[in-house]
Image (cartoon, rainbow, N blue to C red):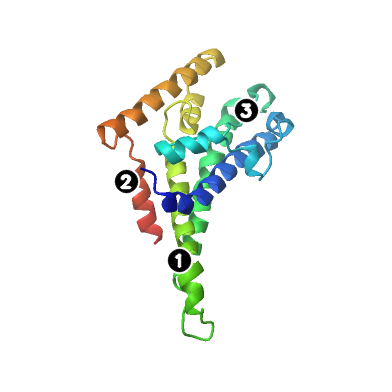
């Protein structure tokens, strides 16, 4: 059964993470010479340009989801093999940086004094500040998780673009790998949930990062 309050805690960080992730894919692709994402209106911080209803629903109900992928044309890039790596890494890296920002804000708000010269009224703390802390904590956790997940070398995740860029294979073979990889990835995720085992190391690695910054 879905915990509505927990969903409300992590939803802002999830939407922000998806938006930042896809924005930087699009922005870096444009800067490297490909106008495809710009022409599709993807160089935007408007969540509606990147978030999909199905992708959000999957995350809420199944624990994993996706945003609308940013498309780019390798033939427009100056150095396709190198630039594809930059485009792929831009999304997860933006999530990692956003995670650092959010967890830093969490530490600042958590340590705000209640009874000093910049004291916070108790009713404000009880009513609002604890929810701000929840949003920041869950947002940081989700963005670190998104970074780790997307850097896994499993098609069609960003990490697979990095891996395949170092292999001398044709574009058509890459496309076939990405198409079949999506089914394999879905099967891995579902197997882990049905069998209740951690096939992918997302949670363990995220906990390590969170403990390091906290």
Q: Are marks 2 and 1 in contact (CB under 8 Å)?
A: no
Q: Pointer 1: what residue?
A: 130
The 10 Å Cα crowd at callout 3, few under 14, some 14 to 19, many 20 or more, is: some
Left/right placement of residue 5 relative to residue 170 reads left
Q: Nearer the viewer, mark 2 or mark 1?
A: 1
Residue toward you, 168 or 50? 50
Q: Earlier in the sequence, mark 2 or mark 1?
A: 1
Task: Say if residue 104 shows up in the picture.
Answer: yes
Image height check: is 69 above or below 118? Answer: above
Q: Secondary structure at mark 1?
A: helix
Q: Residue at point 55% right, 35% down? A: 53
Kindly identify which numbered label has been placed on residue 204.
2
* CA separation in Å, label 3 and label 1: 39 Å
Q: Under tag 2, what secondary structure? A: helix
Q: Going 64% across and 27% down the picture, which residue do you hit? A: 72
Going by the image, does 86 lie left or right of 59?
right
Neighbours of disc 2 within 10 Å: few (<14), some (14-19), many (20+): few
Of callouts 3 and 2, the N-terminal one: 3
Tag 3 near tag 2, CB within 8 Å: no
Q: Where in the figure is residue 91, as x and y percent of width and height? A: 55, 40
Mark nearer the viewer, 3 or 1: 1
Where does the image place residue 193, in percent across and percent down from the top left? 31, 34
Q: Which quadrant: the N terminus?
A: top left
Cα distance between the residues tagged 2 and 1: 25 Å
Image location (x, y in percent) of residue 134: 45, 59
Question: Which residue lies at the image location 74% right of the left edge and 31% below the top edge?
Answer: 39
Q: Nearer the viewer, residue 138 or 11?
A: 11
Return the disc, 3 or 1, that comes first in the chain's sequence. Answer: 3
Residue positioned 38% across, 52% down in the render = 209
Residue marked by disc 3: 71
Place of residue 46 in the rendered image (x, y in percent of width and height, measured from the top left): 66, 44
Position of residue 68 relative to residue 213, above or below, is above
């Amino acid at each position: 059964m879905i915990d509505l309050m927990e969903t409300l805690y992590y939803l802002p960080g999830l939407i922000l993470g998806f938006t930042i992730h896809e924005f930087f894919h699009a922005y870096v692709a444009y800067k490297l010479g490909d106008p495809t994402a710009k022409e599709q209106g993807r160089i935007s911080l408007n969540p509606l340009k990147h978030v999909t209803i199905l992708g959000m629903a999957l995350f809420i109900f199944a624990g994993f989801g996706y945003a609308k992928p940013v498309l780019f044309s390798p033939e427009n890039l100056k150095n396709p093999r190198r630039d594809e790596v930059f485009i792929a890494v831009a999304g997860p890296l933006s999530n990692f940086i956003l995670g650092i920002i959010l967890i830093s804000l969490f530490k600042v708000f958590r340590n705000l004094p209640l009874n000093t010269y910049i004291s916070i009224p108790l009713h404000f703390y009880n009513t609002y500040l604890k929810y701000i802390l929840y949003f920041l904590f869950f947002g940081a956790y989700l963005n670190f998780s998104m970074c780790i997940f997307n850097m896994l070398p499993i098609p069609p995740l960003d990490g697979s673009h990095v891996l395949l860029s170092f292999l001398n294979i044709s574009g058509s073979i890459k496309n076939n790998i990405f198409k079949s990889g999506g089914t394999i990835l879905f099967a891995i995720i579902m197997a882990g949930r049905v069998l209740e085992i951690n096939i992918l190391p997302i949670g363990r690695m995220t906990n390590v990062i969170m403990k390091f910054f906290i």
